[in-house]
Image (cartoon, rainbow, N blue to C red):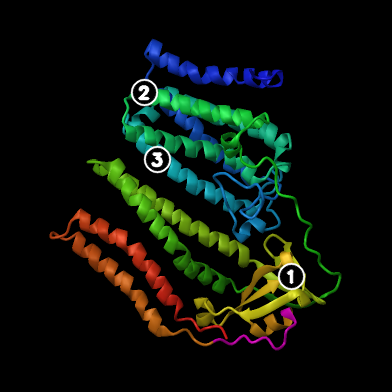
């Protein structure tokens, strides 16, 4: 028997229960169009995410990352951008936007895109999605949902000051977890094979489970499932801002923006070797499963997956660029300070005597081509030690002055161009094989096999390319 303390919490869920069951009763008893109700439910789940992303950009508290304790859920962003200090004021009547939230927002877009893809595939097999979306009742419901959420954001989030107490992950975790759950839940129901009425029942039951879990979590009665939907309930502990000595600047050098740009671009070749395999392993089976005999679905799902892939590439590059491009390295007496000139905010500070194991980075191609240099160093001691990259900078002598290390060696052996010649292999293979596959003697199966094998070949070639860089002493 439930305790008296929990009865108010349980009874408080009654309005949510009725709101979810009424459409189901309407379909069963009064002949309402099930496709319309399903689409309204789906819009409620999906539209909550872009609104949450807008809120997350203004979240003032520092986010938890993969390294924080008690960090769980759908969203995970552990890149250096999440540690970025400072914000940008877009208009005077809104709080500043924090670039450190961009990593979380891009992760949400990636996760939501896949969830929407699975959800759209499930719904398109039951009814014409475009036609249902054009129905007045669906459009009115979508506009009403957006208006209600916008009013709530203005009243509670901004005017009520809620943005001051939350982190981006606290804002984003619940709607993203709900959308992910629904997408894979409904796709599983579709694969099992049900008619529209059973599909609607499964949808409503799944939504009730999510709403009940989120409700329990918000009242402190959550379990593992509730905690997964709710995500973190508090932000990471804010850290003190970097200390800047009162001394004058005795040396300074800025990051070379051109080298940062090309370093970010070449860095993608290595990072996306994993994503290439991931997209092929998940994308091809998905396209074949949902398209069936429909050419429209085949083209649409393929373009959607390519769009997600392009977004991943762009976001990885943008995050790297925002971390390193605006940095100016300054030395105040015996302190090194990394200062963001765009945000006008110091990012980190450390005594030069606490920089250890300084050596030039040898495996960045733009440093070889442009003559720039990047230094890797261990900053700090013990459990507080951090690996940092300083640069790339165009003036190695100025870099030595900033680091206060006159004997630092910055020359590096040239890249072995024989390994670079291997890079043409995948492109020749891809162009030639695709040309053969689309020729009159080729076939769709041959083209799919080529696309499937290409990412694995790219992983091998990425390893071969890295052998061309000079070894460390």
Relative to 165, residue 410 above or below: below
Frontmost residue, 200 versus 48: 200
Q: Which mark is residue 267?
A: none
Q: Is residue 411 left or right of residue 186?
A: right
Q: Position of residue 406 (x, y in %)?
A: 72, 87
Residue 32 is one of the magenta-drawn residues: no
Label 2: state its secondary structure.
helix
The image quarter in which residue 298 lies:
top left
> Residue extending furthest top?
29
Which region is colored magenta?
Answer: 403-412
| Residue located beneath label 3 in the image | 118
Q: Of circles 1 and 3, which is in front?
A: 1
Assess whether mark 1 and mark 2 are in contact (beta carbons under 8 angstroms): no
Relative to 435, residue 129 above or below: above
| Residue located beneath label 1 in the image | 380
Circle 2 crowding by C-alpha within 10 Å: few under 14, some 14–19, many from 20? few
Q: Cα distance, mark 1 to mark 3?
A: 46 Å
The residue under the point 36% across, 80% down is 421
The residue under the point 71% across, 37% down is 162
Relative to 99, residue 167 above or below: above
Tell me which numbered mark, 2 or 1, is placed earlier along the sequence: 2
Frontmost residue, 23 versus 229: 229
Q: Tell me the quarter of the image containing the N terminus.
A: top right
Residue 409 is one of the magenta-drawn residues: yes
Circle 1 crowding by C-alpha within 10 Å: few under 14, some 14–19, many from 20? some
Q: Of circles 3 and 2, which is in front?
A: 2
Instruction: From the image, give the main secondary structure of the stretch colored magenta.
Output: loop
| Residue located beneath label 2 in the image | 198
The residue under the point 75% across, 82% down is 404
Q: Is residue 188 left or right of residue 52?
A: left
Tell me which numbered mark, 1 or 3, is placed earlier along the sequence: 3
Residue 130 seen in render: no
């Amino acid at each position: 028997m439930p305790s008296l303390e929990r009865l108010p919490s349980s009874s408080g869920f009654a309005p949510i229960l009725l709101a979810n069951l009424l459409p189901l009763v309407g379909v069963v008893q009064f002949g309402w169009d099930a496709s319309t109700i399903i689409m309204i439910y789906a819009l409620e789940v999906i539209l909550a995410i872009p609104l949450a992303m807008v809120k997350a950009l203004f979240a003032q508290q520092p986010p938890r990352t993969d390294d924080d304790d008690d960090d769980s859920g759908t969203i995970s962003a552990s890149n250096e951008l999440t540690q970025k200090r400072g914000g940008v004021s877009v208009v005077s009547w809104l709080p500043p936007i924090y670039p450190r939230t961009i990593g979380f927002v891009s992760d949400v877009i990636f996760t939501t895109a896949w969830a929407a893809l699975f959800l759209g595939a499930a719904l398109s097999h039951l009814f014409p999605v475009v036609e249902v979306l054009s129905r007045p009742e669906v459009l009115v419901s979508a506009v009403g949902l957006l208006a209600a959420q916008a009013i709530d954001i203005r009243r509670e989030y901004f005017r009520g000051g809620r943005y001051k107490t939350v982190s981006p992950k606290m804002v984003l975790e619940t709607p993203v977890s709900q959308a992910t759950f629904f997408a894979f839940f409904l796709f599983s129901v579709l694969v099992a094979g049900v008619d529209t009425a059973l599909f609607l029942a499964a949808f409503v039951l799944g939504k009730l489970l999510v709403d009940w879990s989120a409700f329990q979590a918000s009242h402190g009665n959550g379990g593992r499932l509730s905690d997964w939907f709710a995500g973190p309930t508090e932000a990471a502990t804010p850290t003190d801002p970097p200390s800047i000595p009162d001394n004058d600047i005795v040396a300074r050098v800025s990051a070379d923006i051109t080298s940062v740009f090309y370093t970010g671009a070449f860095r993608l070749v290595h990072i996306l070797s994993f994503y290439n395999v991931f997209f092929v392993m998940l994308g091809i089976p998905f396209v074949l499963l949902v398209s069936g005999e429909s050419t429209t679905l085949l083209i649409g799902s393929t373009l959607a997956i390519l769009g997600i892939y392009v977004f991943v590439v762009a976001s990885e590059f943008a995050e790297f660029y925002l971390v390193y491009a605006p940095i100016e390295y300054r030395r105040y007496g015996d302190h090194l300070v990394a200062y963001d000139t765009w945000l006008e905010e110091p990012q980190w500070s450390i005594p030069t005597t606490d920089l250890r194991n300084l050596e030039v980075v040898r495996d960045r191609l733009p440093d070889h081509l442009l003559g720039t240099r990047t230094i890797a160093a261990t900053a700090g001691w013990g459990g507080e030690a951090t690996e940092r990259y300083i640069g790339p900078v165009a003036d190695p002598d100025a870099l030595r002055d900033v680091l206060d290390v006159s004997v630092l060696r910055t020359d590096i052996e040239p890249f072995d161009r024989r390994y670079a010649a291997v890079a043409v292999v995948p492109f020749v293979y891809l162009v030639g094989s695709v040309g053969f596959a689309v020729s009159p003697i080729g076939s769709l199966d041959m083209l799919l096999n080529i696309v499937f094998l290409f990412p694995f070949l790219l992983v091998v070639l990425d390893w071969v390319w890295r052998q061309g860089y000079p070894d460390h002493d």
